[in-house]
Image: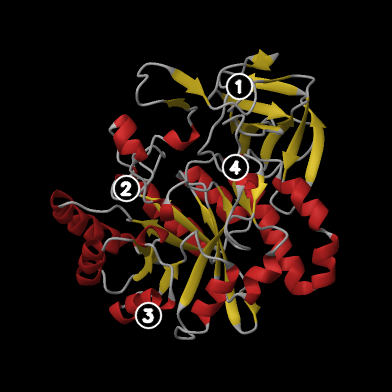
Amino acid sequence: MAGRFYKGRELELLIPASSLEVLKVAVMYGADAVYIGGEAFGLRAKAKNFSLEDMKEGIEFAHERGVKVFVTANILAHNYDLEGARQYFRELKEIKPDALIISDPGMFTIAKEEVPEIEIHISTQANNTNYMTYNFWWKQGAKRVVSARELSLNEIKQIRNNIPEEMEIESFMHGAMCISYSGRCLLSSFMAGRDANRGACTHPCRWKYAVVEESRPGEYMPVYENERGTYIFNSKDLCMIEHIPEMLDAGIDSFKIEGRMKTALYVATVARTYRLAIDEFLKDPELYRERIPFYKSEISKCTYRQYTTGFFFGKPDENTQIYDSNTYCKEYTYLGIVDDVNEQGLYHIEQRNKFSVGETIEVMKPNGENIEVVVKRIVDERGKDMESAPHPKQQLYIDLGIELEQFDILRRKED
């Protein structure tokens, strides 16, 4: 992909991927780089994650299209992790990712010993809140540091002014916010015995809570916001789609999207919208400003929890929390991704949610088009016509009355 530059700095849109399929979608829908997790040593144990074979295929697919791939190895390691990590890095050496994302100094040291040719990026988990921390990691050999979520844009700008020009700053610009400092959370470990710092977070910050007075054990008093109770730790999602100029002026090199457990529809929607917004700002800032309502409309077509600007413009207040629900807003349902076409001119998909013949759905294309179509025909893998496709993961062939392309995404607008 052609590089994008702002005031001499090359910009990067960094997109998450939970699987090989989603990696390919991220690449096709506008990523400059994709970050993924292997089957160990990353902080998303419940994500599908990548086998080494899938990782190899994904890296080759991305590199053929000029897109980089970063691999997360950002757990806080224990003694018994270290030899396995050493072997893991040796295996990664053969498939050549562009960078490793690491937070633990021990893991960093092993990576430097085993794969010195691979860039190391310091994870947000390392609590990177000041320019001395950035300079420390630079002197150790890190190429890039991911800013802590708790920083304002003014603080990030101060960091940029006090670190080497060639050092890179990566900052989250969209996605879920963690209730704990830089994602360093013990709540999941305490409540469910699953350690968030080792990839097994159960997201107890989204659960519903009540208050118990010390001298009245067993008397649970709901903290009411309304009749449903309150979700007192439940943050809104970060969204900086209308603040790209401010992020660029802060000196950020890589705009990072959170969501390594999200669907292909989510990844495609967010990647395509931010790609368009960044490119249009670089082409014509006035056009970008005029199009902000359109970007906000598009970005809301994936699942989200209501939006906030996080810490970027100051400390969050009560308006950045959601007290009455832990559910997502959902405007569209993901139906599947177009694969190849058979001899009868029918297109193969693996179905993700139910849809029916005669139903109106939407085709989402990497180039920005959204095309409304009517489902003409659904055929199962044995060649039998079906009125509807009720079972997830069915292998289907479909006719939508138009020509489709590989990686087109099918979705349905919900009432």
Q: Where residue 206 appears, x then y in whole percent?
A: 49, 34
Q: Is residue 26 above or below residue 205?
A: below
Write down the residue under mark 3.
135
Q: Amino acid at mark 4?
A: Gln
Name which residue lies at 56% across and 18% down.
391
**Image mark for residue 228:** 1
Q: Given this view, does label 1 or label 2 mark the residue nearer the observer? A: 1
**Of callouts 2 and 3, which one flags the residue occurring earlier in the amino acid sequence?**
3
In the orientation shown, which residue stands out farthest toward the front?
215
At mark 2, the secondary structure is helix
* Disc 2 to disc 3: CB gap under 8 Å: no
**Of callouts 4 and 3, which one flags the residue occurring earlier in the amino acid sequence?**
3
Q: Mark 4 and mark 2: span between their CA atoms?
A: 23 Å
Name which residue lies at 82% across and 64% down.
289
Count residues near mark 3 (Cα–Cα under 10 Å), then give few for <14, some for 14-19, many for 20+: some
Asked whether 13 or 354 is in front, the reply is 13
Count residues near mark 2 (Cα–Cα under 10 Å), then give few for <14, some for 14-19, many for 20+: many
* Disc 1 to disc 3: CB gap under 8 Å: no
Q: Given this view, does label 1 or label 3 mark the residue nearer the observer? A: 1
Write down the residue under mark 4.
321
Count residues near mark 1 (Cα–Cα under 10 Å), then give few for <14, some for 14-19, many for 20+: few
Q: Given this view, does label 4 or label 2 mark the residue nearer the observer? A: 4
At mark 3, the secondary structure is helix
Q: Where residue 287 appears, x then y in whole percent?
A: 84, 67
**Of callouts 1 and 4, which one flags the residue occurring earlier in the amino acid sequence?**
1
**Of callouts 1 and 2, which one flags the residue occurring earlier in the amino acid sequence?**
2
Q: How many marks?
A: 4
* Disc 4 to disc 2: CB gap under 8 Å: no
Q: Amino acid at mark 1?
A: Arg
Q: Is residue 285 left or right of residue 36?
A: right
**Of callouts 4 and 2, which one flags the residue occurring earlier in the amino acid sequence?**
2
